[in-house]
Image (cartoon, rainbow, N blue to C red):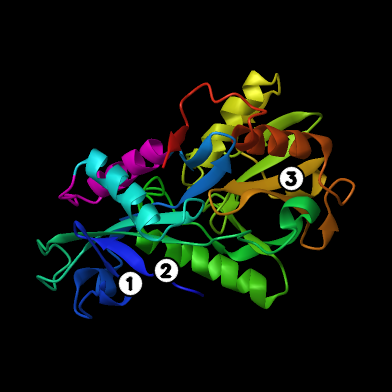
Amino acid sequence: MQYPEWIWQNGVIKRWAEATTHVMAHVVHYGSSVFEGIRCYQTPSGPVIFRLTDHNKRLYASAKIYDMAIPYSLEQINAACREVLKANDNTTDYLRPVAYRGLGGFGLSADTPTDVAVATWKMGQYLGASVLDQGIDACVSSWQRFAPNTLPAGAKAGGNYLSGQLVAREARRLGFGEGIALASTGLLSEGAGENLFLVFDGALHTTPVSAALLNGITRNTIITLAREAGIEVIERDLPREYLYLCDELFMCGTAAEITPIRSVDGRQVGSGKPGAVTRQIQELFFGLFDGKTPDKYGWLEPV
């Protein structure tokens, strides 16, 4: 990975190598961090950050769940995101705001300072070159998502992604592009770090937030755009075998964007190629950035 020159940490733009955390910081031992992933896009009107405020509002919501006080306002974190992009002279990069418990105590309930950083780097296509056009082969993981009332799936917390690492690394080891996890109920949850949409008879079906998943901002964007386009969207519990029976299937997320899935567990999905509804959703989503889809909700926030 090629690292950028500058990063924002605790209110200051500093050189990447100078943004350090002590090895005995709380976050290193207990995974006590919350974070966001945000993409920037070039548009006919200039570079924009996609749903910057919505993402950072979720950062604060995640911190609230974990009783973590962020010592900066939402407006300051938004400004930090813009500042670090400009410092690196990059305006179409990926952004990573992160808040974490720093050095100051070793117990689980220790009252440590909350450190905050915002980094940026080139992301590209997260699951590999050409996957947005060609799709990926996925598998159902042997690892399940955590049960209700164990870890809050609605928080975008660093510790939650230990589950995603198990799912993703197993999939890669077995030769698949990405893994899909079941909830503790045995019903579908989500991908290693992406939400799922299945297509049946032209309608979108997606698993509910009660299925141990993160309520993704890209997920919300797709639901909104699809309904406006007259596509039916149904949030429902879904059994594993529906992955094999659906007409189309795709994953979505800030990093993955809209990634078609052409097979699951070696079973072809539909025609084995991205279908018409998947293509329409891609056009609606990426149309936000080339001007073909109107930005009715102020999602495109200028750098």
**Real-space Cα distance between discs 1 and 2?**
7 Å
Amino acid at circle 1: Trp
Disc 1 packing (10 Å; few <14; some 14–19; many ≥20): some
Q: Nearer the viewer, mark 3 or mark 2?
A: 2
Residue lying at 11% horizontally and 64% vertically, measured from the top left:
110
Q: Is residue 267 left or right of residue 59?
A: right
Residue under label 3, please give it.
249
233 vs 195: above or below: above
Q: Position of residue 217 (x, y in %)?
A: 49, 39
- Check if mark 1's residue and mark 2's residue have beta carbons within 8 Å: yes
Question: Which mark, by number, is residue 4?
Answer: 2
Instruction: Tell me the amino acid under the disc marked 2.
Output: Pro
Q: Is residue 62 magenta?
A: yes
The numbered mark at residue 16 is 1
Q: Disc number at residue 259?
A: none
Q: Earlier in the sequence, mark 3 or mark 1?
A: 1
Depth check, front residue: 215 or 282: 282
Task: State which region is magenta.
Answer: 52-72
Vertical arrangement, residue 148 with respect to residue 29, above or below: above
